[in-house]
Image (cartoon, rainbow, N blue to C red):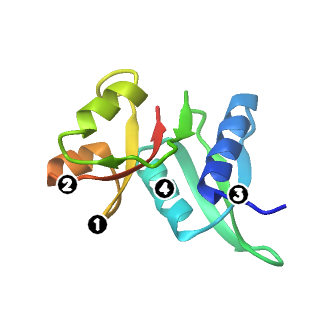
Amino acid sequence: MVDMDRLADAINIIKTHERVGRPECTIYSTKLIRAVLDIMVREHYINGYQEFSDRYAKKAKVSLARRINRIGVVKPRYALTRSDIQRYEERYILSRDFGILILSTPKGIITNREARAMGIGGRLLAYVY
């Protein structure tokens, strides 16, 4: 089976393991997924992750913190200007300062708050709250 979107698969695995109540899960590891996991660690949605090499691919063991109410990938990956960020916050996040949007920008993978502070836009990847 060929994985078409590794980020969507990783987010889906985290979501299902979080919902069932498991303390950890194993996902494939890419640069994009590592950057998203780093943001989730920094925002305290997960406890941490540890990379290891399987026989054929890099994987990460994610330690879940049981703090995720909802998580998802946004498809298609909408292009946002700095003025569009508020509109997508209202669409994907329940209330102000309750969750985060994860964006891919020229400055790297950052949250919506950081993008607003920098005054830049980018592509919308995922949301977490």
Instruction: State the SS at label 3.
Output: strand
Q: Which residue is more in the foreground, 16 or 23?
A: 16
For marks 1 and 4 on the same chain, the one whose residue lies earlier in the sequence? 4
Residue 72 pos. (x, y %): 55, 38
Instruction: Give the residue drawn at x 73%, y 60%.
Output: 3
> On the picture, is 92 further left or further right than 58?
left
Residues marked 1 and 2 touching at CB (< 8 Å):
yes
Amino acid type, mark 1: Pro
Residues marked 1 and 4 touching at CB (< 8 Å):
no
> On the picture, is 28 further left or further right than 129?
right
Residues marked 4 and 3 touching at CB (< 8 Å):
no
Residues marked 2 and 3 touching at CB (< 8 Å):
no
Residue denoted by label 1: 106
Residue 42 pos. (x, y %): 41, 51
Instruction: State the SS at label 4.
Output: helix
Vertical order, 3 against 93 (above or below):
below
The Cα atoms of the two marked residues, 1 and 4, are separated by 15 Å
For marks 3 and 1 on the same chain, the one whose residue lies earlier in the sequence? 3
Residue denoted by label 4: 36
Q: Which mark is residue 120?
A: 2
Instruction: State the SS at label 2.
Output: loop
Q: Which mark is residue 11?
A: none
For marks 2 and 3 on the same chain, the one whose residue lies earlier in the sequence? 3
- At label 3, counting other C-alpha atoms closer than 10 Å, the crowd grade (few under 14, some 14-19, many 20 or more) is many
User: Would you say residue 68 is visible in this rendering?
Assistant: no
Vertical order, 60 against 116 (above or below):
below
In the rendered image, the quadrant that contains the N terminus is bottom right
The Cα atoms of the two marked residues, 2 and 3, are separated by 30 Å
